[in-house]
Amino acid sequence: MSDGYLTTHVLDTARGSPAEGIKILLYRVSGNSHRKIAEAVTNADGRTDTPILPQNKFKPGNYELIFFAGDYLRATGQAGEDPLFLDQVPIRFGMAQETHYHGPLLLSPYGYSTYRGS
């Protein structure tokens, strides 16, 4: 079994709280090919209940997380006019080592950031 795995969470920086109910898709990326390998929804703590990519499915490579932020922003009354400035937020990244990777999303209606967390 691999020692690598991937976790994520979403914080709503405009409200200063975890973002509950955000759908997240995880894709493995190879060239122009995207293959969906996982789907999850954030819990009350803004995290997925289990790693979005557990140890038994981990492989080094290129990945993309897609956060369905627009649905959350609409549900929390932060959406503004259609079309939304932020709707689906993609984060593409690589994982080279078999270790724990954490890719969080810091979200507001008009901006976002990410980093490699722990």
Image: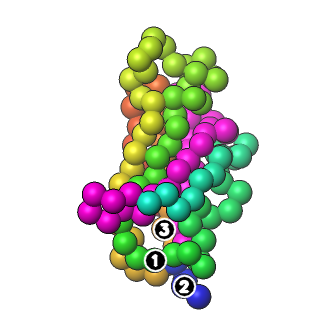
Mark 2 falls on what kind of element?
loop
The residue located at (63%, 23%) in the rendering is 76
Q: Which comes sooner in the sequence, label 1 or label 3? A: 1
Q: CA distance from mark 2 to mark 3?
A: 13 Å
In the displayed structure, does residue 89 sit left or right of residue 76? Answer: left
Q: Rate crowding at label 2 as few (under 14), some (14 to 19) or many (20 or more) other CA atoms within 10 Å.
A: few
Query: Which residue appears farthest toward the left when viewing the image?
Result: 31
Residue at image point 46% right, 52% down? 65
Residue 28 on the magenta span? yes
Q: Nearer the viewer, mark 2 or mark 3?
A: 2
Q: Read off the residue under disc 1.
A: 59
- Indicate which label's residue lies in the foreground, 1 or 3: 1
Q: Earlier in the sequence, mark 1 or mark 2?
A: 2
Local secondary structure at mark 3: strand
Q: Is residue 18 above or below residue 58?
A: above
23 lies above or below 99: above
Residue type marked 2:
Ser
Badge 1 element: loop
Alpha-carbon span between mark 1 and mark 2? 8 Å
In this picture, residue 48 sits left or right of residue 61:
right
Q: Which residue is mark 2?
A: 2
Image: magenta residue range:
5-34
Residue 78 lies within the magenta run: no
Can you give x and y, in whole percent of width and height, for residue 19 in the image?
62, 38
Label annotation for residue 101: 3
**Residue 98 appears in view:** yes
The three-letter code of the residue at mark 3 reads: Tyr
Rendered image quadrant of residue 12: top right
- Residue 52: percent from the left, percent from the top? 59, 61
